[in-house]
């Protein structure tokens, strides 16, 4: 079992940013991140086990398909 989530931001000013977030089963928190423009990115898809795609509110369909295909 992985001890982290690998998050990919889709859309917004940090489109394509990949970072690792620790997995803490004692204090589970929702996967979400606030980007540089103040928008909340929430989970939209899960890829390859521990990799999660976080969707920016202004992401386009093309950006989302590109992240899923990568």
Image: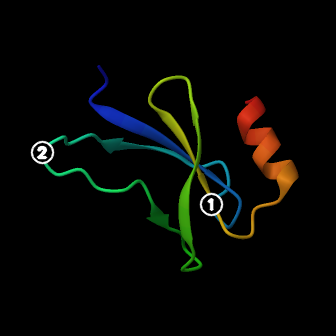
Which SS class for mark 1?
loop
Mark 2 vs 1: CB contact within 8 A: no
Callout count = 2
Residue at 16%, 51% in the rendered image = 27
Give the label, 2 or 1, closer to the camera.
2
Horizontal side of 20 relative to 1 (left or right) equals right
Report crowding for label 1: few under 14, some 14 to 19, many 20 or more residues within 10 A (C-alpha): some
Horizontal side of 61 relative to 7 (left or right) equals right
- Picture colour scheme: rainbow
Residue at 18%, 40% in the rendered image = 25
Query: For residue 12, what is the image quadrant?
Result: bottom right
Query: For residue 39, what is the image quadrant?
Result: bottom right
- Expressed as whole percent of the image width and height from the top left, the position of residue 41 reads 55, 63
Q: Compared with residue 32, is residue 18 higher up or lower down, i.e. above or below?
A: above
Horizontal side of 34 relative to 11 (left or right) equals left
- Expressed as whole percent of the image width and height from the top left, the position of residue 16 reads 66, 48
In this view, the residue farthest toward the bottom is: 38
Report crowding for label 2: few under 14, some 14 to 19, many 20 or more residues within 10 A (C-alpha): few
Name the mark on residue 14: 1
In this view, the residue farthest toward the right is: 62
Identify the mark nearer the N-term, 2 or 1: 1
Name the mark on residue 26: 2
Q: Compared with residue 26, is residue 12 higher up or lower down, i.e. above or below?
A: below
Which SS class for mark 2?
loop
State how far apart marks 2 and 1 are (Cα): 29 Å
Residue at 41%, 53% in the rendered image = 31
Residue at 55%, 23% in the rendered image = 48
- Expressed as whole percent of the image width and height from the top left, the position of residue 36 reads 55, 74
């Amino acid at each position: 079992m992985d001890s982290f989530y690998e998050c990919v931001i889709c859309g917004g000013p940090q489109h394509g940013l990949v970072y690792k977030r620790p997995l803490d089963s004692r204090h589970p928190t929702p996967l979400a991140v606030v980007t540089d423009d103040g928008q909340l990115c929430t989970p939209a898809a899960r890829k390859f086990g521990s990799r999660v795609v976080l969707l920016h509110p202004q992401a386009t369909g093309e950006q989302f398909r590109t992240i899923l295909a990568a």
